[in-house]
Image: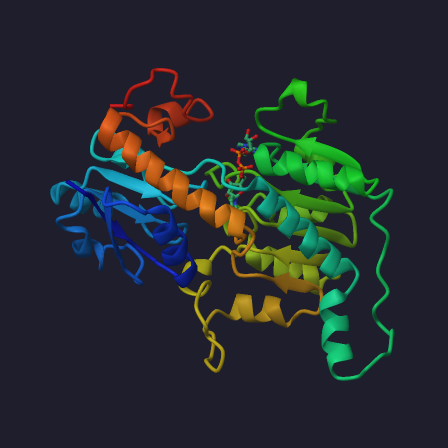
Amino acid sequence: MSTKIAFFDAKEYDIESFENANTGDEFEIKFYETKLSEDTVNLAEGYDAVCVFVNDDVNGNVIDKLASYGVKLVALRCAGYNNVDIEHAFGKIHIVRVPAYSPYAVAEHAMALLLTSIRRIHKAYIRTRDFNFSLNGLTGFDLHGKTVGVVGTGKIGRIFIDICTGFGMNVLAYDKFPNKDFGLNYVDLETIWEQSDIISFHCPLTDETKHMVNVSSIEKMKKGVVLINTSRGALIDSEALLEGIKDRKIGAACLDVYEEESDVFFHDFSGHIVADDTLARLISMPNVIVTSHQAFLTREALANIAETTLANIRQFTVDGRCDNELCYKCEKFGGCPQEHKKLCF
Ligand code: NAI
């Protein structure tokens, strides 16, 4: 019998990659355009698993409803899981994720944003399309010899560090769980704020990291600092960022994520009035580049996401365990090591 999956927040590219990966009759997937939330959770009734992405809201009430419908599994098709109440889920419903699908995709996008921003490529592109070949206002700076602070030295952070090293930059690293084997120059967060010309964020969103960029940390940063966030929007207090830009303290911001992105990103609002004044103001700044949570979007990453998500569901259904299970208890110790080789509860 096929495993029935209710797939939320389905985009054209998701449908294509999952249909390519789902060649047999092992999985029956119903694609819903809508996001999973308290208002839409009833669509999961009668399914074995739900498949969700970064902006689906898997809060306590949604989890209780899913469990009452007999849904056994929430399969995240992403790495981050700040949108899931994993503490509430413990004992009720199992959560699995795709821990790595293409760290290169995200790290390369971070560097693409940085180069675009500091070499004014986005401005030049628009100018030359209008046959304006003036160079006024397009002066950038060399990355070679600059200091980059990298917050989070996991899979993505380390690849970003390799790229920066290739550019001849000095790398300072910060991680809550530093790994001496990586041979990195680990420093404390204060040093990152004070000494970096560029700061790139590659750590998860947790209670501890929420708004780590705030009025007080911005105050400690170098004038003209460039911030890159391809991790999760709420690492940065957007109002504080806006003030830092208006005060000319922050030289540029490259944002692939935004703390209030869930109602805006992934949708076409051209021709509409966007109600989020902070986002509108940020986008209006000449030194802010926003991409809409696009860093993961490569062919390689989409294929890996589809294959790993279906493999997770298969392992859970067939073997009664999953290497990529997430649980509250294991997470407290810095990630679910799955050393027990069985389900977490
Ligand atoms: P990872 O789990 O390999 O690395 C995360 C690192 O952050 C670990 O080394 C961990 O020790 C560190 N960390 C944990 N708590 C910390 C804290 N309080 N302060 C500093 N560091 C801390 O994760 P990976 O794959 O490198 O992904 C990083 C983040 O990138 C994810 O959490 C996710 O939010 C984001 N992401 C964004 C995507 C996008 O399309 N924009 C796509 C994929 C991931």
Figure quadrant of the C terminus: top left
In the rendered image, residue 37, in percent from the top left (x then y), is placed at 27, 55
Residue 279 visible here: yes
Residue for point 84% across, 71% down: 137
Left or right: where 341 falls relative to 201 = left
Could you say which quadrant of the image residue 55 lies in? bottom left
Q: Is residue 342 left or right of residue 215?
A: left
Which quadrant would the N terminus be assigned to in this image?
Answer: top left
Q: Could you tell whether 300 is left or right of 34 in the image?
A: right
- The quarter of the picture where residue 167 lies is top right
Give me the residue at 35% from left, 58% from top. 10
Question: Residue 139: image x %, image y %?
Answer: 86, 65
Total marks shown come to 0
Of the pair 194 and 91, the residue shown nearer to us = 91
Residue 250 visible in the picture? no
Residue 18 spot, x, y in % from top left = 36, 51
Is 227 drawn above or below residue 67 in the view shown? below
Tell me what residue is drawn at x 72 percent, y 26 percent: 184
Q: Quadrant of ligand 1?
A: top right
Query: Viewer-proximal residue, 101 or 16?
Result: 16
Picture layout, residue 167 above or below residue 337: below
Q: Residue at x 43, y 44 (%)?
A: 305
- Left or right: residue 332 compared with residue 343: right
Q: Position of residue 275 (x, y in %)?
A: 45, 73
